[in-house]
Amino acid sequence: MLYMYAIEPDALATWLKCRHILGLMGFQHGRAIAAYPNRDRWRSLVWEACRENADLRDRERKRIEEKLAGLDAKLVRSGGLDGYDDTVAPAEECWIRNAVARQTAARPFHAILATRNPESDPEVVLEEHIDESHPKLDVARELPVLREPEALAKHIGTLVRNSRELILIDPHFDPSFYRWRPVVRACIALAAYAVSGDPQVEIHTLSADRKPTLDSFRRACRKWIPGMLSGRVTSVRICRWRIRDDGAHDFHARYVLTDRGGYKLDKGLDEEHGVTQSVGLLADQEWRRIRDGFRDTSSFFDMEDGAFTVTGGGSAR
């Protein structure tokens, strides 16, 4: 699960606090920063807090600037302004009071990390308690998840909705069997809410002697995948790979990857009601290695007769 944390701008107004708090954040740790009230406004509030800190030296301010510049990989959308009220008084409590009020939204923050807690809200973690051992920050990177579409979509939703690419990897994927369709459809539906532009969706699977022929596989994809498309997802790129003769890489593991991070699935993308599988966040280095390994230019395997694309009209090219 990727948990969403709101961080009060004042909590980042010193170098030591900024380094400590942001060091705990990141997709690979299961902790994402909610850009609240939105990305640009939150950054500007952090800068304002730094300017108002008379004890902050230029060198420390530069370090904070560098940290914020490289923060995009840890930020997610908070879901809009959600009625952020700039008139809330006193002014120094405006952000924290708005953040606490927003906890009634459809997707509340997992916690609010702050320098103050004027309403004694239990979801606020004060700066002196911000540590991995705190119950609100002690999150598991791997959890059992039901092999059902709603359960997996809920688990991976924050990551997929905040990405521009969705890459589904399962060596046994075969849409001609019903059990493969519900979970894959739910994953593609999440991609329809991607951050911007037209989201790119890919499915990678394995070709082997006991698998359907490529022509049969193409026909099954043309028949069933168009019904899985929705919103801004108008096509899916599909790749079938063959293991190389040297056997340097084995195609066994299953993944849900994006351009910002990814998950490893213990069993796969097919549906099996009432049965759980371990779903774990990948460390950044491993996520990059796997993602690069399924690209044409640096792939682990040999592609079977090139990739093809299925569109909403069912065509494959």
Image (tube, grey):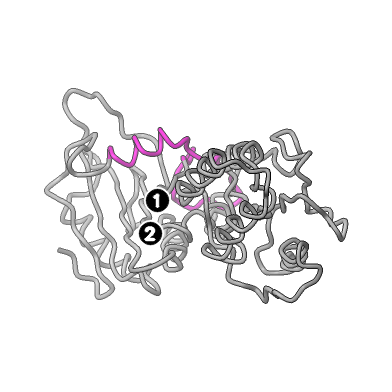
| Residue interval drawn in magenta | 264-293
Q: What residue do we see at 27% from left, 61% from top?
A: 221
Q: Which mark is residue 237?
A: none
Give the residue type at disc 1: Thr
Name the residue tied to disc 1: 258
Name the residue tied to disc 2: 164
Look at the numbered disc 2 and give the secondary structure of its residue. loop
Q: What residue do we see at 67% from left, 48% from top?
A: 54
Location of residue 126 in the rendering, given as x and y in whole percent from the top left corner? 78, 46
The answer to whether any part of residue 280 appears in the image is: no
Mark 2: give few (<14), some (14-19) or many (20+) Cα within 10 Å: many
Location of residue 32 in the rendering, given as x and y in whole percent from the top left corner? 57, 49
- Front residue of 307 and 158: 158
Look at the numbered disc 1 and give the secondary structure of its residue. strand
Marks 2/1: CA distance? Answer: 7 Å
123 left or right of 219 in image: right
Image-quadrant location for residue 9: bottom right
**In the rendered structure, are the residues bearing label 2 and label 1 in contact, judged by CB atoms less than 8 Å apart?**
yes
- Residue 242: within the magenta? no
